[in-house]
Image (cartoon, rainbow, N blue to C red):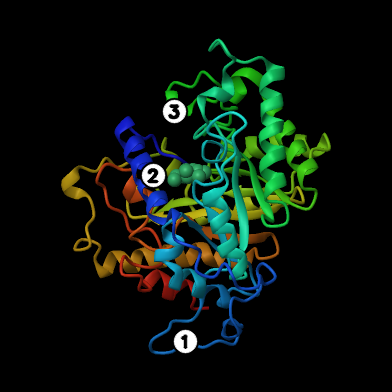
Amino acid sequence: MFRSMSPIDRSAYGVTAALLSLAFACTPSSGAAEAPREPGSPASADQGTAEQATAEQPVSLSAKYAQYFPIGAAVDPGSYQTHAALLERHFNSITTENEMKFESLQKTEGVFDYTAADTMVAYARSHGMKVRGHALVWHRQTPDWVFKDGSGAPVSKAGLLSRLKSHIDHVVGHFKGSVYAWDVVNEAIMDDGKYRTANEAEADQRSPWHGILGTSYIAEAFKYAHAADPDAKLFYNEYRNYIPEKRQAVYEMLKQLLADGVPVHGVGLQCHLSIEPSQVQGNHGYYQTVKELETTIELYSSLGLDVQVTELDLSLYVPGIKYTPDQYYTTATFTPELAAKQAARYGEFFELFRKHRSQITGVTFWGIADDNTWLSEFSSGRKDFPLLFDAEHRPKPAFERVTTF
Ligand code: GLA
């Protein structure tokens, strides 16, 4: 999911990202010189399943889940260094938060810049972490030139397909052997189950891919990605898959793609969750229950597809409630009661994920600790506390809950 961002939010995001990349552009990756380990293997000898927590060190999250699925985190050019201690102890997979998106890699036609992404991939490999690639085709964070011809008019179908192919060839080819799974297409279906088109009411919801190519861009993207790296696992990634109409539409789309012989291997459930389901019947969050998510996992895996949780976090804010600034949570109002409630909800979802360990091949958090989360950055001063570690990088009650079983 990508909440509506005001132009101020977006430009603030751009400035933050630019500052971070400047700040870290000259810093070599800490472990880049170490010999790479097999991706997904334990980061250190003491990370085996038998590892015990000590007074100073809690149990390792990824070691605890070693028999279940890899545990990932989205990282940015700053956080993989500022949060290295947590990352290296608790996670064995990463996703670059923005650095493999279209606008990051090919801002100008034909000019590919892999600097930031390469540094993070080298870091991950030297620490034995898997890398998920995110995301090849999306309606956001894609430069305008992609959809225009030389005179500024919409590019032709053939022109856009050739740009799609060229981007995927370059990018998937570049990361071949390092990125084991790609989110090939992100968010092609709306909450009501219809395809996302170029005519959605809100400008930031519109898909120029669909506007020019119709739904054909989806299959083509998967075919191009498979040709570029036949070993990569290719995912369709979507948010709010717990809404019945949307779940069904995604299922129908995937079923058809598979019937047409399109190389799709898995579905990503973003899972930007909240502390409780919404009470408002028309709100998407009304369906945000463990039961609905279980139905989703079962339905998608009935197609023989892998399922991964790709962008997990658990906001304190309940969808459908309008919060005024004086109601925004602060460190002081994120009380132990609230932390316990968040822990219980995290616990229920992880119980579900463990139950479906044979279908779920990865669980990735969208961030590492509460001091660096898109939910605080993008929401006009509204602070959130959605992850397992607090702003001081200490494990929260939610961490205890998901590692106690
Ligand atoms: C969506 C995208 C992610 C990220 C989040 C918000 O979920 O898939 O890449 O941009 O929105 O940060």
Q: Quadrant of residue 201?
A: top left
Q: Position of residue 238 (x, y in %)?
A: 57, 42
Q: Earlier in the sequence, mark 2 or mark 3?
A: 2
Q: Earlier in the sequence, mark 1 or mark 2?
A: 2
Q: CA distance from mark 2 to mark 3?
A: 22 Å
Residue 306 lies left or right of residue 287; in this view the side is right
Frontmost residue, 188 versus 170: 170
Residue at disc 1, secondary structure: loop
Q: Residue at x 67, y 30 (%)?
A: 164
In the picture, the disc for residue 204 is: 3
The amino acid type, in three-letter code, at marker 2 is Ala
Give the residue number, with chain letter if any, for mark 1: 53
Q: Position of residue 360 (x, y in %)?
A: 65, 60
* Relative to 207, residue 252 above or below: below
Q: CA distance from mark 1 to mark 3?
A: 46 Å
Q: Position of residue 200 (x, y in %)?
A: 49, 22
The amino acid type, in three-letter code, at marker 1 is Ala
Q: Earlier in the sequence, mark 1 or mark 3?
A: 1
Q: Position of residue 216 (x, y in %)?
A: 71, 26
Q: CA distance from mark 1 to mark 2?
A: 38 Å
Residue at disc 2, secondary structure: helix
Q: Residues within 10 Å of mark 2 (few under 14, many from 20)?
A: few
Disc 1: residue Cβ within 8 A of ligand 1's nearest atom? no
Circle nearer the viewer, 2 or 3: 2
Frontmost residue, 285 versus 188: 188
Name the outermost residue toward the left.
326
Give the residue number, with chain letter if any, for mark 2: 18
> Mark 1 and 2 residues: CB-CB less than 8 Å, in contact?
no
Disc 2: residue Cβ within 8 A of ligand 1's nearest atom? no
Inspect this view and state whether residue 286 appears.
Answer: no
